Image (cartoon, helix red, strand yellow):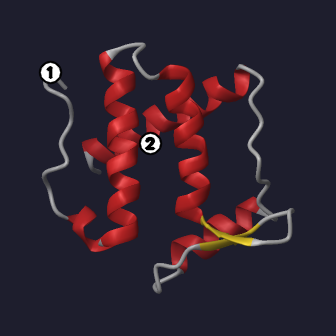
């Protein structure tokens, strides 16, 4: 298991739950989220479209960006680890949009001391 992937998963989960604890509510609601996650994980076209209750399809990356932007607005500058997670999350989303296979290459790295 990748240390980078684990750190990013734990960090983004903490940011999102902390964001929700502030009372923030996402502006989009995904229809059938569990099935959507399964569908996204199997989508070899890398389109990763999700259906929302607002009756439109959006990219899963765009949904993640909504959460990233909100988390950045609330938590950026609160500590080196938090800022690292926000930066790594954004870099990962950028790579998913431009070249998803680049994420299989080592080099994204953990912050020093990890």
Foreground residue among 44 and 82: 82
- Coordinates of residue 86 in the picture (x, y in percent): 40, 35
Report which quarter residue 114 is drawn in. top left
Q: Is residue 103 at all visible to an observer of this figure?
A: yes
Foreground residue among 23 and 37: 23
Left or right of 68 in this view: 24? right
Q: Secondary structure at mark 2?
A: helix
Q: Which residue is mark 2?
A: 9
Q: Residues within 10 Å of mark 2 (few under 14, many from 20)?
A: some
Q: Which residue is mark 1?
A: 113
Residue 114, above or below 64: above
Residue 29, above or below 38: above
- Coordinates of residue 58 in the picture (x, y in percent): 66, 69
Of mark 2 and mark 1, the one earlier in the sequence is: 2
Left or right of 113 in this view: 97? right
Q: Residues within 10 Å of mark 1 (few under 14, many from 20)?
A: few
Image point (19%, 48%), residue name:
108
Image point (45%, 35%), residue name:
10
């Amino acid at each position: 298991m990748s240390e980078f992937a684990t750190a990013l998963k734990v960090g983004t989960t903490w940011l999102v739950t902390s964001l929700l604890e502030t009372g923030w509510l996402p502006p989009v609601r995904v229809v059938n989220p569990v099935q959507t996650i399964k569908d996204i994980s199997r989508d070899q076209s890398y389109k990763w479209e999700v259906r929302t209750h607002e009756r439109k399809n959006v990219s899963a990356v765009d949904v993640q960006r909504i959460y990233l932007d909100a988390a950045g607005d609330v938590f950026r500058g609160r500590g080196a680890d938090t800022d690292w997670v926000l930066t790594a999350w954004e870099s990962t989303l950028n790579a998913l949009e431009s070249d998803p296979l680049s994420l299989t290459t080592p080099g994204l790295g953990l912050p020093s001391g990890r």
